[in-house]
Amino acid sequence: MLELTGKLTISRASELAASIGHLLAEEEHAAVLDLGAVTAADVSFLQILCAAHRSARRDGKSLSVASPSKELLRTVRTAGFERKKPCKQCAGDTCLWQAKEGS
Amino acid sequence: MLDQHRDTFIQEANELLRDLEESLLDLEEKATDQELIGRIFRALHTIKGSGSMFGYDTLTAFTHDIETAYDLVRSGKLQVTKTLVDSTLAACDEIRGMLTDDDNRSGALSETQTEIVGGIRELIKDARGDQPPAPAPAVAVAVAEVSADEPQHECTYRVRLTPELDLFANGTTLLPLFEEMQGLGTCNITAHVGNIPLLQDLNPEACHVFWDIAINTDKGENAIRDVFMFVEDRCRLDISVIDSMGTDADGKDALKLGDILVQRGDLSTEQMNGILSQQQRFGELATEAGIVDQTKIESALQEQQLVRLAREKRAAAEQASTIRVPAERLDLLINMVGELVTVQSRLTQVANSSQSHAIQQVAEDVERLTAELRDNTMSIRMVPIGSAFSRLRRLVRDLSKELGKDIELVTEGAETELDKTVIERLNDPLVHLIRNSLDHGIETPEVRTAAGKPARGTIRLSAFHSGASVRVTVSDDGKGLAREAIRQKAIEKGLITADAVLSEREVFALVLLPGFSTAAKVTNVSGRGVGMDVVKKNIDSLQGTIEISSTPGAGTTIALKLPLTLAIIDGLLVRVANEFFVVPLTAIEECVELKTSDAKRGSGQHITVIRGDLVPYVRLRELFGIDGALQGAEQIVITQVDGARVGIMVDEVVGQHQTVIKPLGRVYKHINEVTGCSILGDGTIALILDLANVVKRAALDEAAQYETVQAGSV
């Protein structure tokens, strides 16, 4: 499990991408990101999340988000990432953005 | 001068209160409907604000806390409960009272009012978690409440934002821009994530996402462009209008999903048609076929939804756009139109008898225009009956609660239109009828379930046009009318003789007689025997008819037949010697001919046989004492009067005649048999008959004759 805190914005994009990449490489089956302490996020981070989720799927692993913070959820909504049906890549599985709806 | 505006304020405030009540009743069913809550809040706010402007200080203070409560409901901090709705409805009654109390505008709150405020304050306190409600100054709230009511030129736009890969390079962040968009109006933002590569291939500092935004706003396209002003050189921004004032560019209805995709270039027309030729839902198919990805479909669907919602809102707003006109002005207009119609028919007569073709042409044109003008003016006074229906909802709710019964009011045909005056005068009778159903008709839940009926009783109010009249029915699924009990009561009260033979319809019609009531108990609501005959009087004065039918155990139905308007009468023009009369069309069933020879054979008894039934008739000749030779056959117009069939005998039935009713004047007011007159094309006056009274008079005359004969023979 990897905990990401504070502001997850473009200035840290490369660093965040690398961290999550490491996480996926280390975990055999289920990778979890704890995002409870995220105070801000932007589109670049959501992009990274999406890319990571897809990579995990391709490698037969799962990537999920635990306790997304309120600010993160707000960003997901404002940026139009929230969706009702899974995206093409995730059809049949839990799409990262669809899961967010329930929480 | 302020007084004149104050009248307008009071009028508008009363309207607001009516709307408010309705919204509250709706809110009970849909406790989380944001639209309703917003409407309620705005209504309270307006009443409070305007009230303070006209010096209604008590009103303002009273409304303040209620407004606060609904503000909390709006922000989700306070739940809508039955207690809240009850208190608010009670508050509406108080406010209504305050509006009429001119002298006491700044007085203290009454006990009831203080109680209501106290209750509301409790709810507010609980919602706020023991923080005392801040006495928010009314002014501050007014400033914050900027939400405009229906905007003027609302438009729905489709915005596609396709950023370049290096959008983030200079630190641009899009989130504040999206929030700005939401400030412009209702919008739907969909992010297309299809192009995001796998993590190892991802350049985290590049932007791989593009967006579709459907926005409904009245701020115009430039406002949208302004939002993206600073990123426009690193994005492609496509804005197109997809819905403006109800139709799209081609004037067609809301675009279908496929059209939207084609318009966006995400789909070619051939592909769309190919998919349409199959049966499944378009979106599913497009995804399955792999032509369009889910994101694009979802985004298009949301756009469709947005447009649809905007359209509905707009339609509702358009209906509400009205102009106020004093009723007297309208009456004056109608009167003048009536005169015009009369003169015009004289013109036609004169033109037809003249040799000039040119004049006849013009007369024809005038006739056509006059008919249009009359139809138009008549329709101005037409108001949907729904307004009367909605007032009754509250009555049913409150009364059923009081009586401990579970009753639902179902309405049909609320859009049926009636003359404004008719609707106003219909209100009291309807209230009476519904009260009867509530009190005597529908049983308590226990009795109902024991009888195998659903515990919840239903009262059905329906209205529909039928020929030249409007039918309004009030029916319930209660215990029905007790035929025997009614008969017995009528015999007791000497209304009928013990051996009188009456049809079912006639028995039920007995309850309409004055002083009649079979209720064993006189309740607060009804039972004093005052209700039904007053209802009948009201309906009579509307020139309508009332008919009662019932099945014991199953329910009762009261059917009202009313003319569309009081100003104009649709009637049958009849002639007796040189006198003309008009028989209201609503009452007429048929016309038959009676040869004078047959009449003589009737040996003085004015009865004829129609398809096996005995039908008495009245000879207008005798009634009005008209002299003049008979010309052979006479006609009988068979009408329905008070539930019974009666014939009106005349020399000739001239034809159908629609005309403006003119009152006879004070001198003739006491003549009950005639309700007014109509001026024919050649200036002759035709008297409009009040059938119920004509029949009564004929009966009295006959009785008097009989007595004279009796007296004479002794």
Image (tube, rainbow, N blue to C red):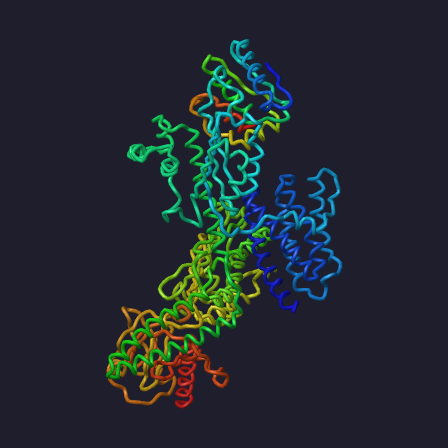
Q: Where is residue A74 in the image (x, y as percent from the top left)?
A: 58, 31
The answer to whether B479 appears left or right of B609 in the picture is right
**Which residue occupies the extreme front position in the image?**
B233
Q: Indicate whether B92 appears above or below B169.
A: below
The residue nearer to you, when weighing A77 against A48, is A48
- Where's the N terminus of chain B, which quadrant? bottom right
Q: Position of residue B532 (x, y in %)?
A: 51, 66
Can residue B511 be seen in this snapshot? Answer: no
Q: Indicate whether A4 appears above or below B516.
A: above
The residue nearer to you, when weighing B25 against B250, is B250
Q: Where is residue B653 in the image (x, y as percent from the top left)?
A: 29, 77
Can residue B641 be seen in this snapshot? Answer: yes
Asked where in the image residue B358 lies, by quadrant, the reply is: bottom left
The residue nearer to you, when weighing B225 against B617, is B225
How many marks the image carries: the answer is 0
Q: Position of residue A7 (x, y in %)?
A: 63, 24
- Where's the C terminus of chain B, which quadrant? bottom left
The residue nearer to you, when weighing B444 against B210, is B210
Q: Residue at coordinates 47% horizontally, 56% vertically from top-left?
A: B319
